[in-house]
Amino acid sequence: MASALLNNPTYALQPAAEQVALQTNYITNFNFLNQYLPDTYEKEFERYGNRTIASFLRMVGAEMPSNSDQIKWAEQGRLHIKYTSCTSAAAISANTATFTVADSGVTYIAIRVGQTLMIQNNTSGVYNKAIVTAVPTATTFTVAYYEATGQAFAVSTACTVFIYGSEFKKGTNGMVGSLEAEDDIYSNKPIILKDKYAVNGSDMAQIGWVEVTTENGATGYLWYLKSEHETRLRFEDYIETAMIEAVPAESGSGALTALGGTAGGSEGIFYVVNQRGNVWGGGTPTSLSDWDSIVSRLDKQGAIEENVVFVNRGLSFDIDNMLATLNGYTSGGVAQSASFGLFDNDVNMALNLGFTGFRRGYDFYKSDWKYLNDPTMRGGLNNTAATATGTITGLLVPAGSTSVYDQIMGKNAKRPFLHVRYRASEAEDRRYKTWITGSAGGAATSDLDAMEVNFLSERCVCTLGANNFVLFRFG
């Protein structure tokens, strides 16, 4: 069914920011021979409301200084031991068997003599319980089965093995060998962001007829004030969106060459969650069973009790529609308004069709993310399920903080799951720098008849425990 919204007129996407003054910004017709004057509205009308999109990281994260070109942190590995690609050299019904572990990245197994194992066929689900009798090599172990019927599956069948305990005879020595804890080490590097606004001294002295205003409250009749403030607001947005969208420059890429050939780019939030987080590839979960599968995945991860789901409009409506269908009822054969929260919705009051959150195993709080709705940012990208591979509809972020080993502090510290590290020392703070050069606007740094406002930040985002995040996207 075609959309009822016509394509024309529509929202404007043409940028209002240019490297030169727009002709429409200034009066060009000073004809005083005409006795008739137009009736003008001096103040700009804010037809797009608040145009900034930054707020996400301020809501969920924190900012902390760093004095290195690289940020490193350690995240805990799993406590218990499990292998999912094990094959037996013994035939079905054998009382003993030798298994080979072929899991990716495993060079030395953590199974020891005397430990008891659960061994399950990956395909059929049949299983055995066994005790380890020998560890011949770094990736093999020998077991004796507890069942009199012996091995329940055929030779070379792929199995999953995990340790559930140990058992020893009376009067024997203790466990042979010990295990060392392993951490997963992750790192990121800051990137330098810059911007600049310049206006010549003559234009600074030019009064305008339009009273300008910006989102941060700046007003006046000097047009350069508006342009300077909009440059500042745009830069502040880029500081956040760069942390969301940044990707590392791959070896052999043109960006790596352009940036000096050693290191380029950074690991933004979307990149990290795509690489080592959870990804919902169906666009938007629309049913309770969809959310049940998400809850099941979170059970296997960190199981964080409270989570915030930052959504675009489509995912927001899908969640609202799903929840609305769960509480409808009829009375006397007539459909009645749904009731939620403290007060019932009756026919004499406005029905609130939106939800701020729900609980299904965990608490999920829903928050609209302007960045995903803004047509000049991700909101203007293809959002059709059939053709929108990679289009992001939402991000689930665990609330609270986690404990990590901080290399700078040299000890464990509590950190938000998402936080920004910016370059700073006693002599230089690069969190958000701004300075004025030239000879106009109070500056006296050169003989340039202009004012140049410079902006700079050097930062990166640390996504801790990416396995607790869920990225919602198409494809």
Image (cartoon, helix red, strand yellow):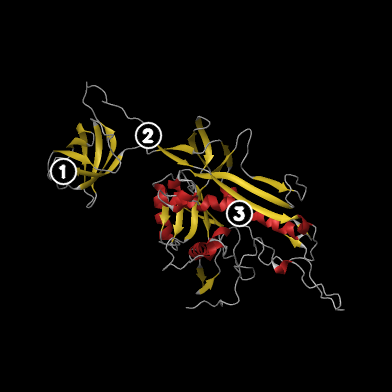
Report the residue at 25% width, 38% height from top. 117
Q: Label 1 belongs to which residue?
A: 151
Q: CA distance from mark 2 to mark 3?
A: 38 Å
Q: Is residue 36 left or right of residue 253?
A: right
| Percent coordinates x, y for residue 58 in the rendering | 60, 48
Q: Is residue 307 left or right of residue 98?
A: right
| Percent coordinates x, y for residue 304 in the rendering | 47, 45
| Percent coordinates x, y for residue 105 in the rendering | 30, 41
Question: For the residue carrying disc 3, how many other residues have a C-alpha within 10 Å: few (<14), some (14-19), or many (20+)?
Answer: some
First reached walking from the N terminus: tag 3 or tag 1: 1
Residue 329 appearing in the image: yes
Type of the residue with mark 2: Glu
Nearest to viewer (mark 1 / mark 2)? 2
Q: The residue tagged with tag 1: helix, strand or loop? A: loop
Residue 362 appearing in the image: no
First reached walking from the N terminus: tag 1 or tag 2: 1
Q: Which quadrant of the structure image shows residue 14?
A: bottom right
Q: The residue tagged with tag 2: helix, strand or loop? A: loop
Q: Which quadrant of the structure image shows residue 422?
A: top right
Report the residue at 79% width, 67% height from top. 42
Q: Label 3 belongs to which residue?
A: 237
Q: The residue tagged with tag 3: helix, strand or loop? A: helix
